[in-house]
Image (tube, helix red, strand yellow):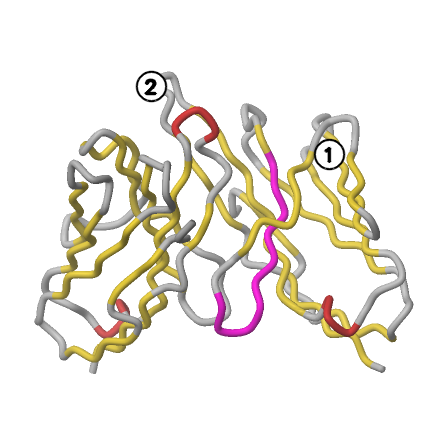
Amino acid sequence: RKEVEQDPGPFNVPEGATVAFNCTYSNSASQSFFWYRQDCRKEPKLLMSVYSSGNEDGRFTAQLNRASQYISLLIRDSKLSDSATYLCVVNTVSYSSASKIIFGSGTRLSIRP
Amino acid sequence: DAGVTQSPTHLIKTRGQQVTLRCSPKSGHDTVSWYQQALGQGPQFIFQYYEEEERQRGNFPDRFSGHQFPNYSSELNVNALLLGDSALYLCASSLPDRGETQYFGPGTRLLVL
């Protein structure tokens, strides 16, 4: 089993739709969680951190469920510019304070006009 | 404020050769991580450097080695290149107390023939 798993997609949705991605992780000791966005042939860029209480940034909402070990990303009123690959990232800090950062394989999202 | 820079942008090598990739972190960052991203996959963690020492390492063979300089820049060396080493190599920098928030460079595309 992969340490971080995502549905690879692709998700193909019309502009204005709401779309949700889930990501599961296997290490219950993981401490911090993020969503990154990666455009084609570009580097990943931080989209948002994910907190236990859930957090929202404009049209984007991220949630963490520690009991079930999954995180989610909800995009409302999707725009053409939201087309990208969304990467789930899980970080576990060891006793030596070193971070073990695991990326999921990414979920491809394509927004059609 | 310069972001993370990497050189070269593209590289073609043949099997058995050695390669050195370079990274300069974002201003103020002293922690550098290296990732390998194969086509269609998420970035895979290679190792992380802090205070000129390797602090954490992923599941990569000893052919992959690195170095961090006093100015926090870093090099990734790969010896005895294999066809399977063809990938996008990403460098990410971060602050030591917020090591999980990664800022990525544009990457180096390595093709091994």
Quickly name the residue at label 2: A96
The structure residue drawn at horizontal position 83% and vertical position 52%, both measured from the top left corner, is A59
The structure residue drawn at horizontal position 55% and vertical position 38%, both measured from the top left corner, is A90
Q: Quadrant of residue A93?
A: top left
**Which sits in the foreground, A55 or B1?**
B1
For residue A8, above or below residue B61: below
- SS for tag 2? loop
Main structural element of the magenta stretch: helix, strand or loop? strand
**Which sits in the foreground, A105 or B19?**
B19
Residues under numbered marks 1 and 2 in contact, where contact means CB atoms less than 8 Å apart: no
Extent of the magenta region:
A33-42
For residue B52, above or below residue A5: above
Q: Amino acid at mark 2?
A: Ser
Are callouts 1 and 2 both on one chain?
Answer: yes
Q: Residue B51 placed where, x, y %?
A: 22, 29
Q: Residue A85 placed where, x, y %?
A: 62, 64
Q: Residue B23 placed where, x, y %?
A: 27, 54
Does the segment drawn in magenta span residue A37?
A: yes
Quickly name the residue at label 1: A64
Tell me the quarter of the image containing the C terminus of chain B: bottom left
For residue A113, above or below residue A6: below
What chain is tagged by disc 2?
A
